[in-house]
Amino acid sequence: MTGMSGENFDDVIFEDGAPAPVENPDLSGHDQAEATLKQAFESGRLAHAWLLSGPEGIGKATLAYRFARYVLANGGTDAGQGLFGDSLEEPSDSLYVAPDNPVFRRVASGGHSDLKAVVRTVNEKTGKLRGEIVVDDVRSVGDFFHHTAGEGGWRVVVVDCADEMNTNAANALLKVLEEPPPRGLLLLVSHNPGRLLPTIRSRCRKLALHPLAEESVASLINAHRPDLEGADVSVLAHLADGSPGRALALADVGGLDLYRDMIGLLETLPSLDVASLHAFGGKLGKTGAEEAFHTASGLLQWWLARLILVASGGPRQGDDNLGGGEGALMQRLGMAASLDRWFEVWEKINRLLIKTDPINLSRKQVVLNVFLTLQNAVRP
């Protein structure tokens, strides 16, 4: 695709109707961030680099491409008009560009010569997607910015996700930031800006995006997965922690069933249902179930974090949203061991889950060990 590199976009590419960020005309819950970008652009003093940060799946990449389209459609040579007359037809308080706009279509197809996406690419030797953004992916940014804009306006680069750059790639990007080109815009999407070089962070204007309200997440789930029942939507919205991307990803990979299986086991503590535990471990340990294992691991870590909050005297979590007296379950288990003990359990389980893939542990055995650790923690 001309002007684009790779096919990995932040916030998940969903299979059930929700468009990838580069194709998504809509954005929910980030009106203030949108207004900040629009005001900066229209002021004529737009910072050359922006760091869009926040949790995964909340719309950072969607905002980055939304802003890129707006700049490309309104930053041409003739007072807000591109070379091919691609500006917005009507003034707007948002960065919205209609899907039938030529700029939108070219950006979505990867055919806009003044937009470049830097993402993880496929390793030609292995045929697999790399686990990081490598230096060759970033070196091309300098060449891209040194060329004259093909449509007489801005050149825009989206790095998604900047956290995935290796050291050499980060240093290559830093060189671009140290000598920003005129009418060049660099948008860095970051889930964890603390992982970036301080010198990169210092050269960007920072814009932090926040998790969406639970009702907003539920509304987006309904829009993209109308097949889901109301009770399932409520649970997904609660599990999502303000991230529509997380909610839809869980729905796509069977996360609800895994979560309910996990809760069913937790409810049997301190006397574990051994048969159900072995069945659960077998489901996650079988060949081809790697994604299910990682999904279940993330859900368990999410649940334990909230259990520790309860054990520390924090608020009970979401009986109404999760149903089945789950808040009471957290309260019961949280009171069954000291806070120090729960921190020990948290650290032990996290270490075990992190080591599973690197040293090729049996996933079923890991699941068994995790629940036995929980059982030992709450036994009288």
Image: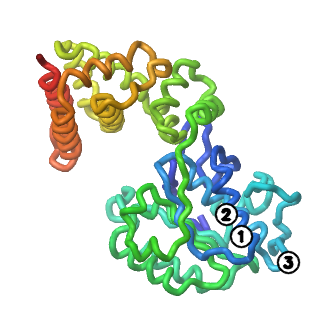
- Camera-near label (2 vs 3) is 2
- Badges 1 and 2: C-beta atoms under 8 Å apart? yes
Question: Residue 152, position in %: x, y?
Answer: 76, 80
For image coordinates 45% across by 16% down, the residue present is 323
Q: How many marks?
A: 3
Give the image quarter of residue 153. bottom right
Relative to residue 14, is residue 292 drawn left or right?
A: left
Residue under label 1, please give it: 41
Question: Upstream in the sequence, badge 2 or badge 3?
Answer: 2
Dot 1 falls on a residue whose secondary structure is helix
Q: Amino acid at mark 2?
A: Leu
Relative to residue 375, is residue 248 drawn left or right?
A: right
Question: Residue 83, position in %: x, y?
Answer: 81, 75
For image coordinates 76% across by 56% down, the residue present is 97
Q: Amino acid at mark 1?
A: Phe
- Camera-near label (1 vs 3) is 1
For image coordinates 56% across by 55% down, the residue present is 61
Q: Amino acid at mark 3?
A: Asp
The crowding category of the residue bearing disc 3, from other C-alpha atoms within 10 Å (few below 14, some 14 to 19, many at least 20), is few
Dot 2 falls on a residue whose secondary structure is helix
Residue under label 3, please give it: 78
Examine the rendered structure and indicate whether residue 137 appears above or below residue 287: below
Question: Residue 348, position in %: x, y?
Answer: 16, 39
Residue under label 2, please give it: 37
Question: Residue 8, position in %: x, y?
Answer: 49, 55
What is the C-alpha distance between the residues marked 1 and 3? 15 Å
What is the C-alpha distance between the residues marked 2 and 3? 21 Å
Residue 205 vs residue 175, the one in the foreground: 205
Examine the rendered structure and indicate whether residue 185 appears above or below residue 360: below
Examine the rendered structure and indicate whether residue 220 appears above or below residue 112: above
